[in-house]
Image (spheres, rainbow, N blue to C red):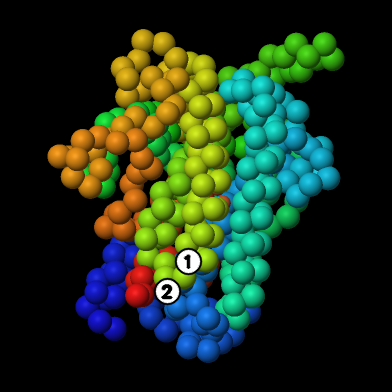
């Protein structure tokens, strides 16, 4: 193991908080994925090792996204015979989400279907090139489903009930500074970034005293509003991750076709993020303490009397510094520098978000291993 790799593994051990034993090099992880060990030259098809590593991490990230979006869609998405909604939904949770926008159910459904196709396409492409597809299911602890009306009772890869949501994405695209140039951005909803919050109803008790009558008049309990608004901010958190991730990794690929894949899927992540960052700001003011997680969230009205870097309708990316301040500000996706960690940073953001609370060490270890291998990729001439 060279020094660079050793340092990275040390960082991972610290960042991941899994036991040293679990992260020790050479750990044997059961499952189909590892039947042949890590990559060898035979697995490369006509792609470089780096391109395969990038595609495999993206496939893993898309599988994680698919899992969490499916949970959202079962409860809050439009219910139809497509992938993301088949179980009748949870009408009160859907109504609570619709406080952010009347079309939320459709958007949740469609974001879910998009993630499913991203994961499937990346795996199909890998296989078409003779490389191994990614499926983390066999490593998963099988996290429990929500017991609320509408959720299927199937094992999950992600936990949406103890989230700590980084909301700095709100200022990221409203500020004129750039994380690539060292800018740090404050959390817009500071309480969401501190406690643990559920973004889905765990049981029907989380619906509180919400009611929906036949004439469509509704009363949504503050308990359920807090959950739906948490989801609203979480949606954008997830999709801004993809927005930067694809742009960062695109700079490391060698094959033009793989570059095309990253630019094309990455663009759809940007479309997702842009939608969600428009909706979250419609949250109405409230303060609520979750009786299960004992965490208190406060949402403020972002639509009134806010400075420009918080203003709700300022949803077009504000021009920011890029490469060199002397070039003058420009409207761009940010950050896109691999110096901030690229795939590993994305994996760590999922972990810090609480998505993997309860998940197996083997699952988390594999996810970070795939991220590390993607970050090691270098463009070949
Ligand atoms: Fe995606
Ligand atoms: Fe996405």
Disc 2 within 8 angstroms of ligand 1 (CB): no
* Image quadrant where residue 248 sits: bottom left
**What kind of element bears circle 2?**
helix
Single out the residue that lies furthest toward the bottom: 42
Horizontally, residue 79 falls left or right of residue 237, namely right
Task: Name the foreground residue: 91 vs 246.
Answer: 246
Horizontally, residue 69 falls left or right of residue 249, namely right
Give the Cα distance between marks 2 and 1. Answer: 13 Å
| Residue at the spot of label 1 | 256
Please say if 217 is above or below 173: above
Front: mark 2 or 1: 1
Task: Name the foreground residue: 71 vs 153.
Answer: 71
Q: Residues within 10 Å of mark 2 (few under 14, many from 20)?
A: many
Upstream in sequence: badge 2 or badge 1: 2
Q: Residue at left 29%, top 69%?
A: 8
Q: How many marks?
A: 2
Question: The C terminus is located in which quarter?
Answer: bottom left
The answer to whether the residues at label 2 and label 1 have Cβ atoms under 8 Å apart is no
Q: Residue at left 42%, top 67%?
A: 253
Q: Residue at left 48%, top 23%?
A: 281
Q: Residue at left 45%, top 47%?
A: 243
**What kind of element bears circle 1?**
helix
Q: Residues within 10 Å of mark 1 (few under 14, many from 20)?
A: few
Horizontally, residue 327 falls left or right of residue 122, namely left
| Residue at the spot of label 2 | 50
Task: Name the foreground residue: 297 vs 335.
Answer: 335
Is any part of residue 306 visible from this angle?
A: yes
């Amino acid at each position: 193991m060279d020094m660079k790799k050793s340092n990275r593994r040390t960082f991972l051990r610290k960042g991941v908080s899994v036991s040293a034993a679990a992260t020790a090099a050479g750990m044997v992880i059961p499952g189909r994925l590892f039947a042949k060990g890590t990559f060898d030259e035979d697995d490369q098809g006509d792609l470089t090792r780096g391109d395969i590593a990038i595609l495999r991490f993206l496939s893993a990230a898309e599988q994680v996204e698919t899992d969490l979006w499916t949970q959202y869609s079962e409860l809050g998405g439009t219910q139809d015979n497509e992938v993301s909604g088949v179980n009748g939904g949870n009408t009160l949770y859907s109504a609570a989400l619709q406080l952010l926008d009347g079309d939320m159910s459709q958007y949740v459904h469609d974001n879910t279907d998009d993630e499913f196709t991203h994961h499937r396409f990346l795996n199909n492409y890998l296989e078409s090139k003779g490389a191994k597809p990614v499926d983390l299911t066999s490593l998963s602890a099988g996290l429990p489903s929500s017991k609320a009306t509408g959720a299927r009772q199937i094992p999950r890869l992600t936990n949406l009930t103890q989230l700590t949501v980084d909301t700095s994405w709100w200022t990221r695209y409203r500020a004129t500074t750039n994380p690539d140039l060292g800018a740090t951005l404050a959390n817009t909803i500071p309480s969401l970034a501190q406690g643990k919050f559920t973004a889905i109803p765990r049981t029907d008790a989380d619906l509180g005293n919400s009611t929906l009558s036949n004439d469509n008049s509704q009363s949504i309990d503050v308990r359920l509003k807090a959950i739906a608004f948490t989801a609203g901010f979480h949606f954008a958190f997830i999709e801004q991750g993809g927005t930067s991730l694809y742009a960062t990794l695109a700079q490391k690929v060698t094959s033009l076709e793989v570059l095309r894949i990253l630019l094309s899927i990455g663009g759809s992540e940007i479309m997702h993020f842009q939608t969600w960052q428009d909706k979250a700001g419609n949250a109405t003011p409230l303060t609520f303490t979750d009786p299960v997680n004992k965490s208190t969230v406060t949402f403020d009205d972002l639509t009134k009397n806010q400075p420009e870097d918080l203003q709700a309708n300022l949803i077009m990316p504000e021009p920011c510094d890029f490469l060199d301040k002397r070039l003058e500000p420009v409207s761009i996706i940010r950050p896109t520098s691999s110096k901030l960690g690229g795939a590993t940073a994305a994996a760590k953001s999922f972990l810090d978000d609480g998505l993997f609370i309860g998940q197996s060490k083997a699952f988390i270890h594999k996810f970070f291993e795939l991220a590390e291998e993607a970050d090691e990729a270098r463009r070949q001439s």
